[in-house]
C-alpha cells in the first residue's frame, strides 16, 4: 500500500468519477483504476462496486477513503510501508 494509492482513492471519492479523479492525479484513467484494484488486492477487500457505467463505494471503501483523506492531507516524510499499514485499520467483518 502506498500513499499514491491512497491519494487515488481520495481523489475518486472527492470527484465521484474515474476520469476526473485520474485527471486530478495526472494519470490515465486505466492507471488509476488499476492502482485502486491493486489496493483492493493488497487489503483483501472490495472498496468499490463497479458496474457498466457507474460505481459506488462499499462501506469499507467509504471508511478507508475517510481515513486515507486524513493521512494524505498530512504527508510524513520517511513514512514506511508498515507504519502506513498500521495507521489504517479496516474492519472486514467477522
Image (spheres, rainbow, N blue to C red):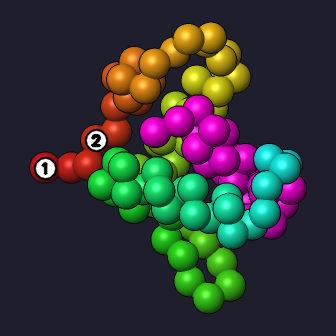
State the residue in front, 8 or 12: 8
Stretch in magenta = 1-23
* x then y, percent, for residue 30: 69, 69
For disc 1, the marked residue is 94
Which image quadrant is residue 66 in?
top right
Magenta-colored stretch includes residue 21: yes
Relative image position of residue 73 (x, y in whole percent): 70, 23
Q: What residue is rendered at 72% in x and 47% in y?
A: 11
- What label does residue 3 carry, if any? none
Q: Is residue 28 above or below residue 8?
A: below
Taking 76 as reference, is 86 above or below it?
below
At x 56%, y 83%, the residue is: 51
Residue where numbered disc 2 is placed: 91
Element marked by disc 1: loop
- The CA distance from mark 1 to mark 2 is 8 Å
Q: Position of residue 49 (x, y in %)?
A: 49, 71
Amino acid at each position: 500500500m502506498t500513499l499514491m494509492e491512497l491519494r487515488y482513492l481520495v481523489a475518486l471519492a472527492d470527484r465521484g468519477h474515474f476520469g476526473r479523479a485520474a485527471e486530478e492525479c495526472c494519470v490515465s484513467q486505466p492507471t488509476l483504476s488499476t492502482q485502486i484494484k491493486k489496493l483492493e488486492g493488497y487489503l483483501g477487500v472490495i472498496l468499490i462496486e463497479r458496474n457498466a457505467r457507474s460505481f459506488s463505494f462499499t462501506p469499507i471503501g467509504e471508511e478507508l477513503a475517510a481515513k486515507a483523506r486524513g493521512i494524505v492531507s498530512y504527508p510524513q516524510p520517511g513514512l514506511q510501508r508498515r507504519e502506513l499499514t498500521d495507521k489504517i485499520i479496516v474492519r472486514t467483518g467477522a
